[in-house]
Image (tube, rainbow, N blue to C red):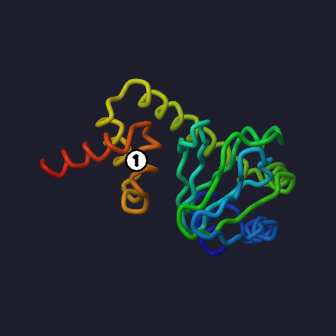
Amino acid sequence: MDEFEQYLRTRTDLNDGDINYILSLAIHKHLRRNEFLLREGEVCRYKIFVTKGLLRTFGTAADGSEHVLQFAPEHSWTLDVESYDRQQPAHSNIAAIETSEVLLWPKTDFDNLLSTLPQLKDLSLQLISRNIYNSRQRILTALSATPEEKYQEFIQSFPNLLTRLPLHMIASYLGISIKTLTRIRQAQLRR
């Protein structure tokens, strides 16, 4: 919980009472490596904050292949936004890549927090704007960049994740084959 408290203190001017209230509504959950927090078809009922570890949001194609949509390292938020907002079955999964600690807020509690704490609502709006910007950038990269450019952008965006992620997940996130990713990495090592 100290991680989240520190996170709020550096990004908002919430007072101790407000922070304690937010924390009092949180559900602390420990996730084992590869444990699911949400499965496709379930309703996303929680706003999720990662205090420790690393999660991924991904879809599964008919052939069983995975398509990673997002990585959520410590100090980040995640959820299946459409499922959460509409309270409909999710089209994606959320699972731990490594042992993780998360805080969960039920939708009704988090909606209440947003309506009573303007500073938390402001933070939430900033995060939504940043996610929209990042999603647009990711779409543009996916549509127009070469595999080498996609990997270079990944390195610049997520330098701390390179050693924490298996290659097949990075390839899935980039929308390239593992063979192509291996070739790109070998070419960089030779330089």
Image height check: is 20 above or below 183? below
Q: In which quarter of the image is residue 129?
A: top right
Residue 137 position, x and y percent, is 47, 32
Farthest residue to the top: give it: 144
Residue 59 position, x and y percent, is 61, 42
**Image point (59%, 71%), residue name:** 3
Q: What residue type is labelled 1?
A: Ser
**Image point (38%, 24%), residue name:** 144
- Depth order, front residue of 155/64: 64
Farthest residue to the front: give it: 63
**Image point (79%, 41%), residue name:** 89
Q: In which quarter of the image is residue 176?
A: top left
Image height check: is 164 above or below 3? above
Looking at the image, residue 111 sits to the left or right of residue 38; the answer is right
Q: On the rendered image, what quadrant is the N terminus found in?
A: bottom right
Q: Name the residue under label 1.
A: 157
Looking at the image, residue 60 sits to the left or right of residue 40; the answer is left
Farthest residue to the left: give it: 191
- Depth order, front residue of 181/30: 181
Residue 115 position, x and y percent, is 83, 49
Residue 105 position, x and y percent, is 78, 59
Q: Element under label 1?
A: helix
Looking at the image, residue 60 sits to the left or right of residue 41; the answer is left
**Image point (63%, 75%), residue name:** 2
